[in-house]
Amino acid sequence: MNWSVPRLQVLWLLPWLLTPAFGWSQPSQPGPPPGVSIPAPGAHLSLDEALAIAARDHPTLQTAAEQTQADVAAQGIEASALRPHVGLEGVWKDGPNSAPGLGFQGLANSSIISNFGGQAGDLVFSQVLADFGRAESRVASRRYTTEADVQSYLAQRQWVAWGVAQAYDAALGAQKLEEVAKEDVDSRALVVRQAQARFDAGLVSRVDVDFARANLAAAQVRLTNAIANVQEAFASLNTAMGVVRPGSYQLDDVSTTPALPATPVEQDVLTALRQRPELSSYDEQMRALGEQAKAYAADARPLLRTEITAGAVDAQKSAINQPHNYAGALIFTWPFMNGGLTRSEIQQVQHLMAALAGRRETLAQQIRLQVTQDRANLAALIQSRPASIEQLHRAQDVVKLATERYRTGLGSLIEVQEAQAALLEAETNVTQLNYQIATAQAALQYALGAYGGR
């Protein structure tokens, strides 16, 4: 059995002086910037503002913050074991001398008032003098648990921020695709007018007009779907921010000059393993369990405490002479045999620590894979961007040429429609690619445990 020097408490020591001795301190928690307000529908909303709103209003973060505060309070509960306790008692009893004490601590528990209407009122002071590390280990365990919850809060905050970034980029992409759909409608409406003019001039048959109008109708359907997608995207953005009312906003566009990470993937993996708050939370939980094991071991060691009581005793009908209205005691207990309870409690903690270590290693492997995959995905998207832009430029040139050829009678309507379809595909690809790159960059920063907005 490991022994340690008992922590002696001076009776007159003020309660708050015990706090530094056990490291009971409230952890610093990141919070949203002051003065953040939800913009009105249609107003401007930057990504940083969206992240700040989510940090304040998202219910997941509110829950995590309250859990952390509960653990801070739990530290005070455990620390109270080594602080002075003072209470007031009062009793009127009637019965024989063998009447029970009814759970009182001080003079009210005396047998002198156990018969024929005795009364007592007293003030009881109790103080643990030495507990051989019980309270200290439990406070330390709660402190590490609190730090683990702080790290979980940070992990939840980054997860929420990552969700906001995804929703923000998705809303931007939906808006841009709506613009592409509108341009496609305008382009096909122009072809309808050209086909109608050529038909009126007797240069083409009615088939060209009908074919052009059918393509215009298909473009209008795509525009309707694009508008609906914008509404859905903003609903997702509001949900990601923790905002309950509907509404759309004016958003800031993403950078058009993405860059690949300059660091090697091995360094990024090490950075992630060092920065991810989920791993830090596991580390703090391990420390908390270690302190819990120390507390269990201390439960089998001696306990020294004192109790002092003073007050008034009225025992007129008692035959016992009671000259003093105060009492004091120095109480020593040592539960050196408890049926193997301590050994089993410590073994339980050891197995819990082993299971926690396994879950931590599983998460570490997932983080390694996540960083590697996110880097590869970002690199592939960036490398494909020049070809997509080149495809868009060529499609724009082909549409101009095909439209002019049809207007002058040198080309067919099918040629124009094929060119427009190719341009729509190219514009859609480039638009989606830009926001996929922005989202991939945010994903890599989240995997590294460093996402905080653009």
Image (cartoon, grey):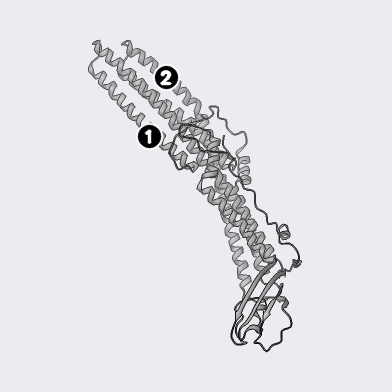
Q: For the point 62% across and 48% down, which residue is it? A: 29
For label 2, count other residues whose C-alpha is less than 10 Å away and answer few (under 14), some (14-19) or many (20+). some
Q: Nearer the viewer, mark 2 or mark 1?
A: 1
Q: Amino acid at mark 1?
A: Ala
* Mark pair 2, 1: CA separation: 27 Å
Which of the two labelled residues, at mark 2 and mark 1, occupies the earlier sequence position? 1
Query: In the rendered image, which residue does mark 2 sit on?
Result: 396
SS state under label 1: helix
Front in this rendered view, residue 195 or 87: 87
Q: For the point 68% across and 67% down, which residue is it? A: 85
Tell whether 278 sits left or right of 207.
Answer: right
For label 1, count other residues whose C-alpha is less than 10 Å away and answer few (under 14), some (14-19) or many (20+). few
Name the residue at the front extreme. 316
Q: Amino acid at mark 2?
A: Gln
For residue 273, above or below residue 125: above
Query: In the rendered image, which residue does mark 1 sit on?
Result: 228
Front in this rendered view, residue 320 or 368: 320
* Residue 275 percent coordinates (x, y): 62, 45
Q: Which picture quadrant has residue 423?
A: top left
* Residue 379 percent coordinates (x, y): 54, 33
Would residue 80 be visible to someone looking at this image? yes
* Residue 63 percent coordinates (x, y): 53, 51
Q: Which picture quadrant has residue 354?
A: bottom right
* Residue 52 percent coordinates (x, y): 55, 40
Image quarter where the N terminus lies is: bottom right
Q: For the point 31% across and 11% down, which residue is it? A: 409
Does the CB distance between marks 2 and 1 fall below 8 Å?
A: no
Would residue 412 be visible to someone looking at this image? no
